[in-house]
Amino acid sequence: MEKLICRWPAFCAVGALGIAVQLGALHLLIHCLRMHYLAATGLAVEVAVLHNFVWHKRWTWASRNITGLKETAKCLALFHLTNGIVSIIGNLLWMRLLVGTMGWNYLAANMTTIAAGSLLNFWAGDRIVFRVRSGVSGNGE
C-alpha cells in the first residue's frame, strides 16, 4: 500500500504532462489540420498514451525494472490494451456525448473524460502493465 501511495503522485504528474500533450495535439489537429473532433481526439489520445507509457516506465514504475526490447514491447502492448483502450474508447464515447450531443467545448469535454479514466488507468498500470514479475523487481515489491 505504501508503494501505491508513493506512485500516485508520480502517476498524476505524468498524467498532467500527458494532458498537456493531448490537449495540445487536439488543438493542433482541430485548428491547424481541420480534422473532425472525433478523429482528432483518437490521434491526440494515442500521442498522449505513448508519452505516458515512456514516462511511467522511466519514473512511475521504474523500480519494476522493465528492461529489454521484448519486455518493453510486451508492456507497451499491455499498456495499449488497458490504459490505451480505456483512454481512447472512453474519450471517444464521452466526447461524442459531451461535444456532439450536449454541445460542450471540446477542450472542457476532453479534460472531463481524462479525469474519469485516471483511477482505472492507475490500477491497470500497477496491476497489469507494470506488475511485479518474478525475478524482475529489484526493490522487493
Image (tube, rainbow, N blue to C red):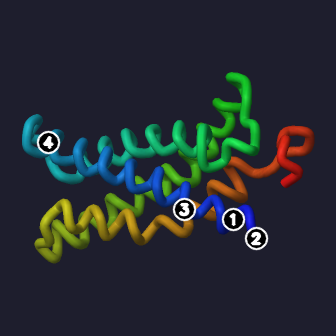
Q: Front-most of 37 and 16?
A: 16
Cα gap from disc 1 to disc 2, whole angstroms: 5 Å
For the C terminus, give its image quadrant: bottom right
Q: Mark 4 points at which residue?
A: 35
**In the rendered structure, are the residues bearing label 1 and label 2 in contact, judged by CB atoms less than 8 Å apart?**
yes
Q: Name the residue under label 2.
A: 1
For the N terminus, give its image quadrant: bottom right
Q: Is mark 1 on a helix, strand or loop?
A: helix
Q: Name the residue under label 3.
A: 9
Front label number (4 vs 2):
2
Q: In this view, does 32 lie to the left or right of 4?
A: left
Q: Is residue 135 left or right of residue 2?
A: right
**Which quadrant would residue 48 be assigned to in this image?**
top left
Q: Front-most of 5 and 94?
A: 5
Q: Name the residue under label 1.
A: 4
Disc ID at residue 127? none
Q: How crowded is mark 3: few (under 14 residues within 10 Å), some or many (20 or more)?
A: few
Cα gap from disc 4 to disc 3, whole angstroms: 34 Å
Q: What element carries label 3?
A: helix
Q: Which of marks 1 and 3 is nearer the N terminus?
A: 1
Q: Front-most of 124 and 56?
A: 56
Cα gap from disc 1 to disc 3, whole angstroms: 9 Å
Please say if 110 is above or below 84: below
Q: Which of marks 4 and 3 is nearer the N terminus?
A: 3
Q: Residues within 10 Å of mark 1 (few under 14, many from 20)?
A: few
Locate residue 66, reporting x and y percent: 72, 36
Q: Earlier in the sequence, mark 2 or mark 3?
A: 2
- The amino acid on which the numbered mark 3 sits, given as a three-letter code, is Pro
Q: Which of marks 4 and 2 is nearer the N terminus?
A: 2
Q: Residue furthest right?
A: 135
Cα gap from disc 4 to disc 2, whole angstroms: 43 Å
